[in-house]
Image: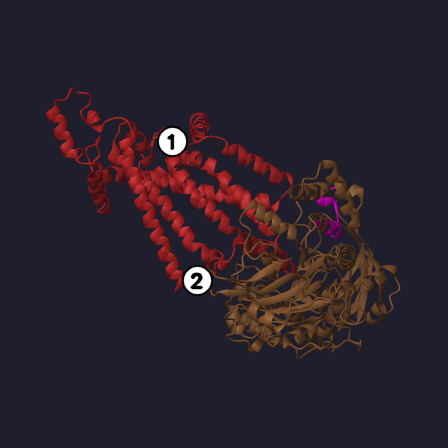
Chain colours: A red, B brown
Amino acid sequence: MSALRRVLGKLGGLLLTLFLASLLVFFSRFLVPGDPVSFLLRGRKPSPEAVAAVNAQYGLDLPPWQQYLSWIGGVLHGDFGRSLQYRQDVGAVIGERMPVTLGLVVMAGLMIAIVGLAAGAIAALNRGRVLDRSILIGLTALGAIPSFVGAIVLIAVFAVQLGWFPSFGSGDGGIDTLYHLVLPSTALALVFVVLVGKVTRSSMVDQLGREHVEVATSRGLRRGTVIRRHVFRNSIGPILTVSGLLVAGLLVASSIVESAFGLAGVGSLLVQSVSRLDFPVVQAIVLLIVFAFVAVNAVIDILEPVIDPRAAAGGGAR
Amino acid sequence: MTLLSIDELSLDLHDGTRLLHGVSLEIAAGETVGLVGESGSGKSLTARSVLGLLPPRAATAGSIRVDGREVLGASRRDLLALRRTSASMVFQDPRTSINPARTIGDHLTESLRVCGGWSARDATRRAVELMESVRLPRPDEHLRQYPHELSGGMLQRVMIAGALTGSPRLLICDEPTAALDVTTQAGIVSVLLEQRETRGMGVLFITHDLNLAAAMCDRVVVLSGGRVEERGLAREVFGNPQAAYTKRLVAATPTLAGAPGGDSVGPAVVVERIQGGSDATGRAGSVAGPPGDRRAEAAPVPPQALLDIRGLSKTYRRSGREAVTAVDDVSLRVERGGALGVVGESGSGKSTLARILVGLEAADAGEVVVDGRARTSLPASRAARLAHARSVQMVFQDPYLSLDPRLSVGRAIEDALHLHSHATSRDARARVLRLLDQVGLEERHADARPRTLSGGQRQRVAIARALAIEPDLLVLDEATSALDVSVQAQVLDLVASIRRHRGLTVLFISHDLAVVRRVCEDTVVMHRGRIVEGGSTAAILAAPQHPYTRRLIESVPRPGWDPAAAGAPLEPAGRGQGV
């Protein structure tokens, strides 16, 4: 029963967060300089009547709170309004670009998980040795490289010099798209591998020193079994928490990488829409990012009692 | 035939530090050998070496044979086989020894399923059998429970059951009861003895507690600094120690019987019996009205009471959980210069009482009067905090945690002085040296950092810092529990001598009756937040009235050959109810 209450509580918190985020996302537009109407009219000297007509067409003549209500009402029905630059439904504009971004983020996420966990685990198991230190230094160096620099270096080496991977575009779908996404995903993953790697290392080092690990060893379990069943199993909590926090950074950084590799994804659409004052698109994308972040973290929160049974009892997570 | 034979075992760390200097011992099947020593004596290291659990890159010499097979230098496969079937180990703290993320059932069946290739069903049946044999009450339910749902005593039974899964011939117990309450310890010891009898195992029993070793073991080996100081039959070694080290150890060990070790000092302490009194059971619903009033009518208040606690209660409420009454209508008095012992097991509320006294915690009801001034409420302002601190000071359990590692000892004490008086630096320095001298430290210690000091020295520093403020009342909360017996004896002597010279009033909180007996003329026994019995320490030990007190005293281990001891010697079976 208490588990159900917990989940309901989390969902309530999630809805509240989304509501506050929608307020922030919507009204921040009024703080930004620039008038969308002048962009719509492409610099022509408009007659006051034309301006009024455009304002009325896009509902810009209403007071802000009414604009918010009609916007949020639409959002709840899946209607994010019309894009000013494409003169299409925002949903259609974003939907067209979503697969590329999803592919990019999922592929980068897998790379981060595999490389980060492996590097952290290897470092932890060789704690204090040369291998541990090399991995730590390597990770830190990678983490210090901004995504756009990483992207340029990857293009220079693997696309231009070696010619192994394409440097531009998202391919023709299927395998070809995955192939096109290898370099962008790598560029995106580089920064985040360091965080996952370091958290994995410190979490596992912490567990390796625990008495229950020595007990497991004393019972004749193989080292691999001890590591898997006791050390790694108990290290998952902190790793998941940090991974959840990474989601926001990953989504934001994807816009930089998409621009660098000429990918027609949601991230590059965001950058483009900001510069063109296409508010409906910006609002929709930001809201989506917030939603993805909050939802992922809510799922991790709900999973916590499964990972650490003491959390269900309200005890300390040690 | 010898089951375990350790021959001239020595062990060097990779930096060349030698931790074991030629340790030898033998255990036959069905025999219990005690390995006794203080921290750093190498007893745990010796025991772990038997299972091949060595520090990384350590170099060993000598030989360890289990069942005739050499352990040192054995292949990894042989080591795994040894750990699975020949020898197993029960560790000190069951709360940290079982993976908190896995169920009890997983812990008990893991090695059978993963290493032995048993089916889940057979392994589970075996786990239930083992849990029954260590007298766990509800095996089927425990299978699905997580470690945090069981008490320490139950978890240690799970650990023992886990150690027995491979039907080992040798069982190594590394301080298996040191983290448990004394009444729980009795149950664990009887389970261990019973299993040894029925399985004919050899047991290597490691402990720092001479009384426990005497109760459990046939033979003992006394270890100090990685060397064997003395060996022989338990009765002879403890009854008539030969080596100088063993003599000191035996003399330092507090006991329940014989002449009290503490000096009899100061005026007698008046222990306030609670209204409705020592028979705490018949007290239902009598809480209404301030108990102080009634007491004032009942008996004239002796004028000199330095500490007067009346009807003190504290309940912890946390949302979604049952409220816990940690301190329940506690009343007691200590005269100026007296020493009162507060004895209780974990969860008895004794530490909450201490925290209320020093103003770290607010009481829900009742009052605390120290030297005529009310000290009940939490000090709100800086001035009130200082005033409270001047009247009550506390020495905490763990001297490794209660001193700032970056402050030199002299600085730590000087800071306390500056906080509470406007002494000039030179005056303060002189007083620091005087205080260090009083607690048996020297001038050179003033510039030392805590990490360069031993546990006993650190606790002396903590006491000196508390005394610097010249408090009316010194509260010692388990102040010697983390220390070795010989160091504990020194600290207890120190407390006695300070009482003698300064007329200090002491509230001594401990789980250990024998230690309290050494320091305090009077004692109260706390159980579940209430004082169940109070009076002179000698009288309580000689003729305990409350059933809980009786159980507490009976649970203290005694050598089986010592008829002077009040309780019966520990027997293999029967008294396993104290989970």
Q: Is residue B176 visible?
A: no
Hey, which quadrant is residue B172 in on the image? bottom right
Q: Is residue B3 above or below residue B79?
A: below
Chain letter of mark 2 equals B
Q: Nearer the viewer, mark 2 or mark 1?
A: 2
Quadrant into which the C terminus of chain B falls: bottom right
Closest to the observer, B365 or B92: B365
Residue furthest out toward the left: A49
Assign the magenta stretch its main secondary structure: helix
Residue type for callout 1: Ile
Q: Is residue B407 visible?
A: yes
Provide the residue span drawn in magenta.
B447-462
Residue A259 placement (x, y as % from top left): 35, 29
> Is label 1 in a helix, a strand or a loop?
helix
Closest to the observer, B32 or A164: B32
Left or right: B243 in relation to A20: right
Number of the label disc, if any, that sits on residue A256: 1
Quadrant into which the N terminus of chain B falls: bottom right
Q: Circle 2 sits on which residue? A: B320
Q: Is residue B571 above or below residue B417?
A: below
Residue A312 placement (x, y as % from top left): 46, 59
Residue type for callout 2: Gly
Q: Is residue A293 above or below residue B309?
A: above
Asked if residue B459 is among those painted magenta in the image, a careful observer would answer yes
Closest to the observer, B566 or A100: B566
